[in-house]
């Protein structure tokens, strides 16, 4: 059986049955939720927006309501239903959807800017709520933003039971990416291009509205302390030039304004990034204009504080660090012994031994040890090893790839991953808690991620770890470098809750 490669592992995480109908007898009396959305809601919304005098030609935005208010963060079921509705109507002639759209896509035509798309008249939204007795209710309504009232006649409701996957989606908190850039839904450190597109749109509209004159700007590069955002100012300037909102020059004598960006620390790993264009002369009639967005920069604040603090030795560092996770993805983890050369050298279980043929250790190769994990839902799983006295590494197995190795775990199925162990005494392994800077035994971690975007983000963090792909120990991160990495990793885990779960096993008496 071939092991899935990293390149195509992530798309397998997408749940195929998120909107499948309920299996109860209620389905005989009314359509399931997915059918109701496709056959009832979509035609109704399309007709209202294209033919009704009140809505025809008006700019609308699709949102999720929570307690009657647009919600930047709600449940994953409501967000997925809203996204399906948008996908069904966004390309219908006559339907005008405001910017940004529900997916949070801030990419735009780089040769034009449509500031009128910010003037949304109606919020059209879905709200999912519990109705008691294992019943759930979904309401569709339209909110008139001019008088803050519900639009009469624009309403539909569904009530019934949810499928298992729908109930699980309802229980998961999800961010509405159309609110990206606000404090509750910040950009991530891996989205400098989307951040720049968002800021360029906001600042570009401000520039086009002013009538005091034209700006010929020179760039002031990003703050050197915000490396993850390096290049945002240049990206913004490129977008603004495409919009013909400003002209850019490298000649300081010709420039009459400067374009600069700066990230201001707000709280923990949250920053507010400001992009500003300001005249170079205080007497200029050109106004200073700016736009801002919130961005999540894991570990940056802790790293800046560390750089400003007095250097520490490993002995001075705290003995234990906590990587919090309230997810419930992993069911179990344990070390198992697999017998036979076929099992130990299959596509799913293999680790380079570097043992010469004829060695007295060769007999051990017929048996091997593996970390066996089971997940409650389909997940991408990564494996780490904190080697006793040798630091933290990521396990890479036979391929020893430069990129972080990922395995796919199917819901309620076991997955085995070979460990670089030649022998293991009875009762040598036990559950481990916490992430220690100086553990007193080997620790093996399994990190399960049930969301493809979260998995990609975590893999970028894990890429920073040295890799181990033989039974020989390999120098890993330790001391202050490990502490800084753990701070960034902990922030990434927190950002992607509730999709990230981890468990660990402590191993002693390894020979």
Image (cartoon, rainbow, N blue to C red):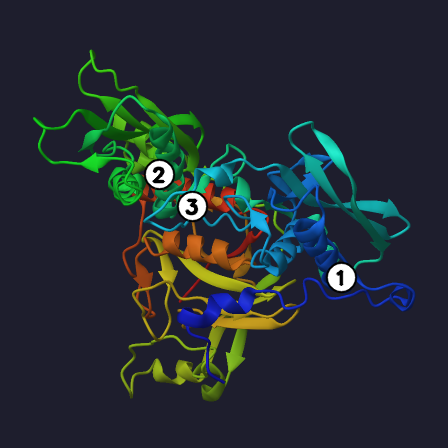
Please name the residue that numbered disc 2 is placed on: 200
Q: Are marks 1 and 2 in contact (CB under 8 Å)?
A: no
Q: How many marks?
A: 3
Q: Is residue 366 left or right of residue 314?
A: right
Q: Position of residue 29 (x, y in %)?
A: 92, 65
Residue for point 43% across, 42% down: 114
**Disc 3 to disc 2, how far (Cα)?**
30 Å
Q: Are marks 1 and 3 in contact (CB under 8 Å)?
A: no
Please name the residue that numbered disc 1 is placed on: 164
Q: Is residue 315 left or right of residue 185?
A: left
Q: Position of residue 244 (x, y in %)?
A: 28, 40
Q: Position of residue 480 (x, y in %)?
A: 30, 39
Q: Secondary structure at mark 1?
A: helix
First in sequence: mark 1 or mark 2? 1
Q: Secondary structure at mark 3?
A: helix
| Above or below: residue 73 compared with residue 472 | above
Of badges 1 and 3, the one in the foreground is 1
Of badges 3 and 2, the one in the foreground is 2
Q: Are marks 3 and 2 in contact (CB under 8 Å)?
A: no
Residue for point 61% across, 54% down: 86
Front residue of 481/425: it is: 481
């Amino acid at each position: 059986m071939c092991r899935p490669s990293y390149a195509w592992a992530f798309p397998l995480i997408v749940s195929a049955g998120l909107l499948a109908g309920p299996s109860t007898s209620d389905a005989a009396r009314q359509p399931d939720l997915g059918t109701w959305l496709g056959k009832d809601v979509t035609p109704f919304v399309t007709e209202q927006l294209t033919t009704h005098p009140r809505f025809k030609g008006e700019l609308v935005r699709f949102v999720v309501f929570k307690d009657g208010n647009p919600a930047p963060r709600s449940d994953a079921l409501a967000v997925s239903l809203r996204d399906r509705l948008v996908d069904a109507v966004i390309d219908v002639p006559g339907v005008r959807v405001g910017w940004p759209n529900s997916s949070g896509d801030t990419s735009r035509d780089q040769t034009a800017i449509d500031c009128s798309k910010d003037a949304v008249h109606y919020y059209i939204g879905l709200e999912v709520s519990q109705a008691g007795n294992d019943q759930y209710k979904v309401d569709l309504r339209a909110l008139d933003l001019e008088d803050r009232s519900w639009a009469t006649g624009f309403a539909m409701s569904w009530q019934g039971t949810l499928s298992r996957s729908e109930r699980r989606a309802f229980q998961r908190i999800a961010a509405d990416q159309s609110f990206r850039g606000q404090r509750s839904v910040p950009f991530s450190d891996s989205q400098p291009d989307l951040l720049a597109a968002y800021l360029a749109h906001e600042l570009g509209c401000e520039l086009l509205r002013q009538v005091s004159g034209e700006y010929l700007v020179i760039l002031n590069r990003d703050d050197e302390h915000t490396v993850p955002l390096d290049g945002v100012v240049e990206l913004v300037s490129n977008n603004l030039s495409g919009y013909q909102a400003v002209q850019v020059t490298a000649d300081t004598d010709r420039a009459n304004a400067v374009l600069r960006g700066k990230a201001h620390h707000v709280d923990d790993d949250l920053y507010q990034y400001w992009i500003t264009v300001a005249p170079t002369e205080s007497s200029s009639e050109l106004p200073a204009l700016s736009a801002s967005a919130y961005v999540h920069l894991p570990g940056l604040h802790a790293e800046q504080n560390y750089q400003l603090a007095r250097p520490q030795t490993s002995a001075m560092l705290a003995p234990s660090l906590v990587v919090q996770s309230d997810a419930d993805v992993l069911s179990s983890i344990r070390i198992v012994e697999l017998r036979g050369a076929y099992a130990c050298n299959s596509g799913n279980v293999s680790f380079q031994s570097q043992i010469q043929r004829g060695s007295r250790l060769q007999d051990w190769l017929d048996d091997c040890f593996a970390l066996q994990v089971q997940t409650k839902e389909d997940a991408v799983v990564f494996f780490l090893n904190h080697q006793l006295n040798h630091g933290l590494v990521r396990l890479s197995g036979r391929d020893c790839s430069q990129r972080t190795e990922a395995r796919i775990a199917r819901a309620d199925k076991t997955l085995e991953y070979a460990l670089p162990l030649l022998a293991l005494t009875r009762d040598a392994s036990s559950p481990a808690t916490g992430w220690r800077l100086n553990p007193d035994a080997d620790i093996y971690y399994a990190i399960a991620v049930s969301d493809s975007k979260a998995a990609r983000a975590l893999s970028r963090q894990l890429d920073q770890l040295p890799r181990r792909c033989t039974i020989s120990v390999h120098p890993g991160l330790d001391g202050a470098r490990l502490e800084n990495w753990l701070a960034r990793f902990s922030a990434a885990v927190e950002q992607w809750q509730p999709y990230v779960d981890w468990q660990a096993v402590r191993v002693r008496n390894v020979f």
